[in-house]
Amino acid sequence: MNDQIVNRFKLSVYLLLASISIILVFLGIFIFGKNMFAQSILLNLSTEIGGAVIIFFIFEKLFSLESLENNNKLSISDKEILSKIDNKLETVFEKSNQFDTNLLYTTLGLKVETRRDKIYQNFDINRKIENTGNVNALYYMWADNYYHNIINAEVLRDNEFPFLRVYFEFKKHSWGCNVGVRPLNDKALANEPFKQYLLFDSRIPKESDNNNLSLSKKISVSIRIADRYIKHWEYAIDIKSYDYVKFPRKYIQFKTTDNDWETHSIDLLSNNWLPFTMDGNRLHGQEKPDFSIIPLVVIEFGSYIEDANRPSEGCGLIDITNIRLSSEPK
């Protein structure tokens, strides 16, 4: 389209110059026929313009032919280059479709490099060393907004000992409040050599003794862990016949009732791991959990009620710290 416009413009210029040349000839012969000086000037000017038109026309055609030859050469070269680029891109796309499933934990924002250690998270935050320190202990805090649940979490220190303090309001008929705990230094924890147990410590803070707060003195905690394929697994006992909405399964609960630290143990090799269908890589992964890499630990909070299937409604305050791997249950 642009070439057509340019060509039309060039043709218009040629016609304009030719018309001017003809007009000058007409003026020289018929108007200034008796004035030889004026006639000579006009005829010379007409000749120069006409000659310029012819020369410009010939030069433009020669230049167009040369450009066309160069363009043809470039086109052949471009085709070769584009062919090579297409082949390279095809190879790249083939490799990109072969995503390493061992790196799925990086989709959580974690670094590719894993960390071989027993500590998953100790809540000792350090933001002085950018990109290397333990800059953030949590992925998220979750509460059932439909029933106006509330959860709040903050990292505190007790005599320089760091811990996570969680306040929750868990309303009746709602889903429990929980936090997603990130691994230390934003590096997924490589369980090598494999350790069977994941431990954590909890306590009821003394602030809960304030009767004006109406806080539960018995707090229940349940656990969900994402494996190396980001498939979420609940630490729970399967119930063959149940109402999925009210009682999806019987969670293994960890009761906290004391102001002193208590240690709780989670068996990573237990048969009591059930897939969680509301988050994570729920449609893929393995039929059994693979905790050789641990990128996410979810802790759910509620009040402790005897024989309840999961943490129950209520308000509470609880401290959590030192989530770690161990070869022993305690």
Image (cartoon, helix red, strand yellow):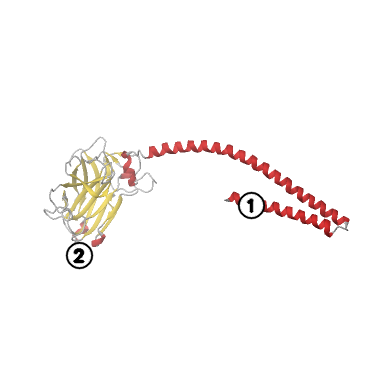
User: Does residue 257 show up?
Assistant: no
Residue furthest front as drawn: 30
Percent across and percent down for residue 142 are 27, 55
Give the left or right position of residue 40, taking residue 303 as reference.
Answer: right
Name the residue rendered at 26%, 52% in the picture: 179
Which residue has dot 2 on it? 212
Would you say residue 140 is visible in this rendering? yes
Q: With respect to residue 210, does 284 lie above or below?
A: above
User: Would you say 137 lies left or right of 2 here?
Assistant: left
Give the mark nearest the N terminus, 2 or 1.
1
The amino acid at mark 2 is Asn
Amino acid at pointer 1? Arg
Q: Circle 1 sits on which residue? A: 8
Q: Secondary structure at mark 1?
A: helix
Give the x, y percent position of residue 295.
29, 44
Q: Position of residue 43 (x, y in %)?
A: 82, 53
Q: Nearer the viewer, residue 173 or 312?
A: 173
